[in-house]
Image (cartoon, helix red, strand yellow):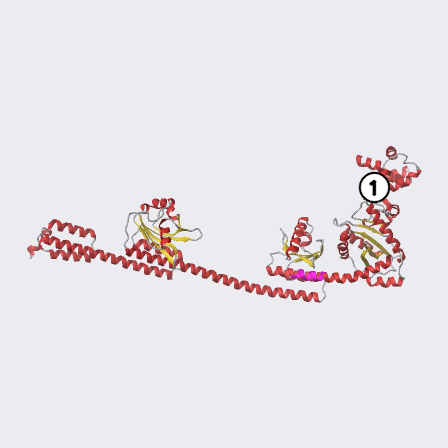
Amino acid sequence: MSKKHDLPASESLALAPGELQAELLAMLQRNASARDYDRMLARIETDVHDPADRSLLEGSIRAAVAIREQQTLQQRREKGLMVVLESANDLTAIRDLELVLGAIVRRARQIFASDIGYLTNFDRLRDDFYIRAAEGAISERFKNVRVPQDHGICGHVLTHKTPYHCTDYLVDRGFAHEQGIDLAIQEEGVRSLLGAPLMVGNHCIGMLCICDRHPRFHEPWEVAMLSTLAAQAAIAIENARLFQETQVALQRASEANASLHRQAMEIEAAAEAQEQMTKLVARGCTMLDLLDMVASLLDGHLALLDEAEQLMQHTGAGNPLIECMRDTRVQDAVHLALSACRRSGRSQEVESTHIRIAALMGADRLLGALLIASDKPMTPTQIRTFERGALVAGVVLLSQERSELVVSNESAATIRALVSWQQESFPALQSRARPFGLDLCDPLRLIVLSVEERDIEYALRRVRTGIGRGILLEKFEGFIVAICADDGYAQLERGMQETVVRDERLNTLGVTSATLTTVDALPNSFLSLKRGIGILRALGRSHEMVAESTLTMYSLLFEQRQAADVANFIDATIGKLVAHDQRRGTDIAGTLLAYLEHTQNSRSTADHLQIHVNTLRQRLELVDGLLENWRDDGRFLELHVALRLHRLRRGLQGAGDGGLTDASALA
């Protein structure tokens, strides 16, 4: 026995094949490598000479190798199942989708001992695939490549919805190649690929792929295992999508609930505001009361414009709208916005400002406009409240117009009775005037304004905004006629100047009477004032109010005359003199007028003009050359009238009598 064990290994193999089989079992037990089995097989072929023994031993070795391969395959399958279980755990434990997909790619690469693993997602907006997760890739071109839906392995998997394997990508003709994709594959050095589709129902949403940089053939179990991992990745992506949609739906539901709650609160506030405005109007409020209420409800500043877009009323002393409406750019923007309001029936924001405007309509007639200025943008409910306020303001304006119409009819009848040639008795006239706060026993003043017919109603409303009791003001015989006590005249005249006479949009002329001590003087005064309007028209004047005393003589001379007749008279009488002044920039006509008004007294005329007497004589010699025979006694009156008309037509005004034309220059 001991001698037998001392034999060399070759002799031992030759003498004891059973011992070799025992060694094979030991190799299987310790999981020897394939190289160990190859070395043993080489020893048998060299040292065992008996064909029967060699065949038996070779069969044993091949059986051991098969058993080893089966064990290895079983181990890899078990490892794959463990990976599947781990991935399933990730789906429930990891909330970050990108981490789950990265773990699936990493495990797929580890299971198959591949060089590269990656997962692509199908972009439905661009109709192509992009790499969403990758491991083992080096090339940036490969990581960022986008694969059209009809090219590459991705296109084949998308079309057939089954796994695909190729041992050498660049020479495989089982799918359509694309130059950009092939360049990325070549730069990464990829040869073998195995890809499995990510299926959600019947839709392929991507592909899980393993790659090697050498040719490789994959077993069916590997394809099945990769398909299982791909299914898990698809579940993860779909769950993430559904979770995101659920989150979005919940967010939208929460926002909708908050919006509904906010709208309910705003509607309740709007209804309360409507109720407050309705109660205020029912109690008989003024327009300013309504403006103050709307301003407090909306926390803003309000202003009321008339139909000519002029500021009528406003809230608060520091209202910014007062200053804004003085800016011509803002006025233009307000006009455009108001036009848009009339077309749309809704309020509009004034461009480049923090102002909103709403039109006040009465049927198809513009009554005015309501402006609001706020420090922050208005909410839709606040805008609707503002528009309701505008509707209520329109109702208030219509109600005021209706009330004013009744008063206006009575006021017009009173004016008619006062200026009529067939006056009623004084007690009757006094009873008519007393309700308006006018005492006919006091000294009176009469004013007549001429405005174009289409503007009379507007001008009346403008003047009425600034007057109080004790004044009769109405349209009569195509004019605006005002009768007031002498002590209230200055305020009335100033209000007319500010509201209508100086308004560039109104072609206004006015004539005022002297103080009238009796009611009987009103008819004659009314006739004289109308004559004064006629002479101002003939002279082509506008935007002016003058005293009737300055126009009496001219009214008598040029009544029923046109502007051309007056111009012809001035030109025929002193035309050369006027032309000389215009050409030379002198005032020889003024010198001649002063000379005539000082009864041709050279000394007093020179003192008045503050010039030397010799200078006056030189000017008069110049007049001798321009006007022939002007020194004849019969021409003085004609020259004097022509010179005064020329002065009046030029619009020279003095500084006295409340802005009226200076009587000393014209009387």
The answer to which quarter of the image holds residue 274 is bottom right
Residue 447 in the image: x percent, y percent? 83, 53
In the picture as drawn, the residue positioned furthest to the right comes out as 633
- Left/right placement of residue 508 relative to residue 430 reads left
Q: Which quadrant does the N terminus fall into?
A: bottom left
Res 99 seen here:
yes
Which is more toward the observer, 314 or 367? 367
Horizontal arrangement in the rendering, residue 537 relative to residue 209 (left or right): right
Tell me which corner region of the image, top left, top right, bottom left or bottom right, holds residue 5: bottom left
Asked whether 390 falls inside the magenta stretch, the response is yes
Q: What span is in magenta?
A: 388-397
Residue 627 is situated, as x and y percent measured from the top left of the image, at: 87, 35
Q: Which residue is mark 1?
A: 567
- Front residue of 303 and 278: 278
Secondary structure beneath dot 1 equals helix
Q: Is residue 538 left or right of residue 79?
A: right
Q: Residues within 10 Å of mark 1 (few under 14, many from 20)?
A: some
Residue at the image position 24 percent from the left and 56 percent from the top? 72
Mark 1 belongs to which amino acid?
Ala
Tell me which residue sits at (40%, 53%) in the image. Answer: 122
The front one of 93 and 124 is 124
